[in-house]
């Protein structure tokens, strides 16, 4: 229960109260504890330091964290004290994240045959010195993979739909189920609809 609660999302605002990230409750509490941020009460926009916040008793109907001597209220929104931006965690270069970045879509012909039918293609083949990096790996369907073989797109007469780049997405932003009702006071609906990746 406590572990799940610690994994709940907390909206992170910068000093200007613009949303910059979504962090876990665990991370949010650390930021408040070390005075990098304060908790925002969405009902009245009051700010709480760690001392203020930890002195509050959770209501009977709300989630809480069982600490050693007390129950802690779970923050839904925090505001950073000193930074204008939270450095977003780098998206790790992994098979799973390449599938996510490319939306399970062949980057040559655009088909979406399902994960089983897609593989990771080195744009510049490894045999020609191509590296395993965000900007040299894309999803390709079986047919395109076969056609391209051990060649560059130019050598194979194929064209990438877009140049591959390192994604800068914030995965929790996109998940409707991961949002909390009170966040709507800080975040417009349009905000959620921004593309997950930027070039
Ligand atoms: Zn294809």
Image (cartoon, grey):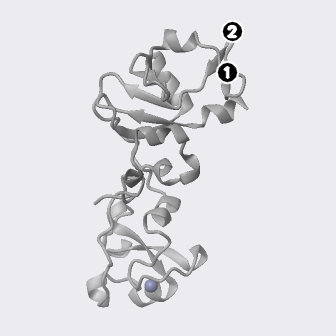
Q: Quadrant of the C terminus?
A: bottom left
Badge 1: residue crowd in 10 Å (few <14, some 14–19, many ≥20): few
Q: Front-most of 3 and 91? A: 3
Q: Front-most of 45 and 134? A: 45
Q: Is residue 122 left or right of residue 55?
A: left
Q: Front-most of 84 and 115? A: 84
What label sits on residue 69 in the rendered view? Answer: 2
The residue labelled by disc 1 is 59
Q: Residue 1's spot in the image, x, y percent?
A: 73, 32
The residue sitting at 42% across, 34% down in the picture is: 12
Work out whether 183 lies above or below 133.
above
Badge 2: residue crowd in 10 Å (few <14, some 14–19, many ≥20): few
Label 1 element class = loop
The residue sitting at 48% across, 57% down in the picture is: 94
Give whichever of discs 2 and 1 has the lower sequence position: 1
Numbered disc total: 2
Q: Residue 125's spot in the image, x, y percent?
A: 36, 75
Q: Residue 24's spot in the image, x, y percent?
A: 53, 35
Q: Looking at the image, do the residues carrying marks 2 and 1 touch, with CB atoms under 8 Å apart?
A: no
Work out whether 181 lies above or below 68.
below
Label 2 element class = loop
Q: Front-most of 15 and 115? A: 15
């Amino acid at each position: 229960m406590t572990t799940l609660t610690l994994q709940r999302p907390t909206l992170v605002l910068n000093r200007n109260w613009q949303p910059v990230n979504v962090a876990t409750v665990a991370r949010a509490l650390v930021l408040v504890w070390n005075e990098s941020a304060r908790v925002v009460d969405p009902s009245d926009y009051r700010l709480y330091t760690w001392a203020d916040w930890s002195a509050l008793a959770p209501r009977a109907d709300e989630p809480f964290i069982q600490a050693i001597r007390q129950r802690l209220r779970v923050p839904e929104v925090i505001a950073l004290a000193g930074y204008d931006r939270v450095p977003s965690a780098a998206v790790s270069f992994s098979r799973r994240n390449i599938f996510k970045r490319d939306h399970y879509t062949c980057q040559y012909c655009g088909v979406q045959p399902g994960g089983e039918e897609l593989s990771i293609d080195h744009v510049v083949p490894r045999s020609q010195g191509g590296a395993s990096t965000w900007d040299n790996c894309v999803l390709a369907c079986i047919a395109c993979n076969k056609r391209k073989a051990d060649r560059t797109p130019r050598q194979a007469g194929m064209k990438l739909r877009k140049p591959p780049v390192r994604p800068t997405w914030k995965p929790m932003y996109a998940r409707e189920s991961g949002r909390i009702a009170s966040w709507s006071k800080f975040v417009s609906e349009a905000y959620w609809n921004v593309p997950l990746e930027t070039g």
